[in-house]
Amino acid sequence: MKIAIIGTGNLGKSIAKGLITTNAITSLYLTKRNLEEISEFEGYKNVFLTKDNEEAVQNSDILIFAVQPRHFEEILINIKALLTDKHVLISTITGYSIDRIEGIVGSDRFIIRSMPNTAIAVSKSMTCLCSNEQGKKRIKIAEAIFNRLGTSISIPESQMQAATVVCASGIAFWMRLIRATTQAAIQLGFDAKEAQELAMHTCEGAASLLIHTGNHPEEEIDKVTTPKGCTIEGLNEMEHKGLSSSLIQGMVSSFNKINNIRKEQL
């Protein structure tokens, strides 16, 4: 696939690393105003670094936009005349609706919104996708890209704001939980490196159990809780201190914030 990433910031870099690692490209153009910030990609076969978005568009079929929202409209206006019927536009921009994109480039374009997370750099992203009517004809292309970089799911656009909180912000939420588990392990006598290793792999194991078995979390919890045991004692203390409610309230707060951001953009 001939892919361009327009705006290779943190997310763009993560996508690029995933694409390169999984050999998902025929060619890959990476654009950035300051090329020194993406110099780590120099020397890779069929990977081209440029400041020129137009050059990237003209040499690619799939355009992945990972720019800041305030720059997106100007970029679309500048490349509009270069778009052909082969181009698939994939936006990763939070809160930027398909209607707004169509208003600039036209509803006859293949337009797809995606919401990956930074785990895409290690091919473990949970990516949510939606599209306009034309984009439905190319949604399989987006799925093929993001399934190589983790897992993807197609959802209605009305759920994209919530998906941003659960999947993109969710990485930070899980990191904080892993950090807390690490801190507890240190307090229980492990050194810092051992503590983090225990926390990371236990977290990975818990998620893998659910992915491979399809079980509800409580089914797996029941397997490790015994009457008057240490596990249920710990779980109950965490719930008394508001573990579940704090996480839920935090995610709802993030959702409210992202909706406010969207209103400000309209």
Image (tube, grey):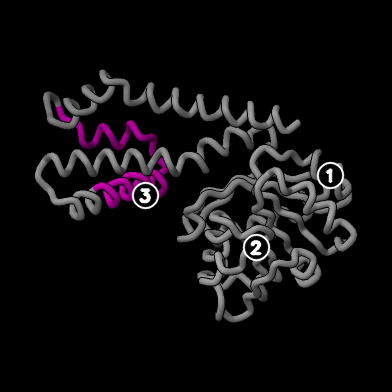
Inter-mark Cα distance, 3 to 1:
39 Å
| Residue 204: x %, y % from top left | 33, 50
Residue numbers of the magenta segment: 199-226
Question: Which residue is drawn at the image coordinates 52% and 49% (left, top)?
Answer: 117
Question: Which residue is drawn at the image coordinates 63% and 37% (left, top)?
Answer: 160
- Number of marks in the image? 3
Answer with mark 3 or mark 1, whichever residue precedes in sequence.
1
Inter-mark Cα distance, 3 to 2:
36 Å
Is residue 217 toward the left or the right of residue 231 in the image?
A: right
Q: Taking 127 as reference, is 23 above or below it?
A: below
Quarter containing the N terminus: bottom right
Q: Which amino acid does label 1 sit on?
A: Glu
Q: Which amino acid does label 2 sit on?
A: Lys
Inter-mark Cα distance, 2 to 1:
24 Å
Q: What residue type is labelled 3?
A: Ser
Residue 94 is marked as none
- Magenta stretch: includes residue 220: yes
Question: Dot 1 corresponds to which residue?
Answer: 102
| Residue 108: x %, y % from top left | 89, 50
- Disc 3 to disc 2: CB gap under 8 Å: no
Question: Which residue is drawn at the image coordinates 38% and 21% (left, top)?
Answer: 245
Q: Taking 147 as reference, is 218 above or below it?
A: above
Question: Dot 3 corresponds to which residue?
Answer: 208
Answer with mark 3 or mark 2, whichever residue precedes in sequence.
2
Answer with mark 2 or mark 1, whichever residue precedes in sequence.
2
Which of 45 and 263 lies nearest the eye of the viewer?
263
Question: Dot 2 corresponds to which residue?
Answer: 32
| Residue 198: x %, y % from top left | 22, 50
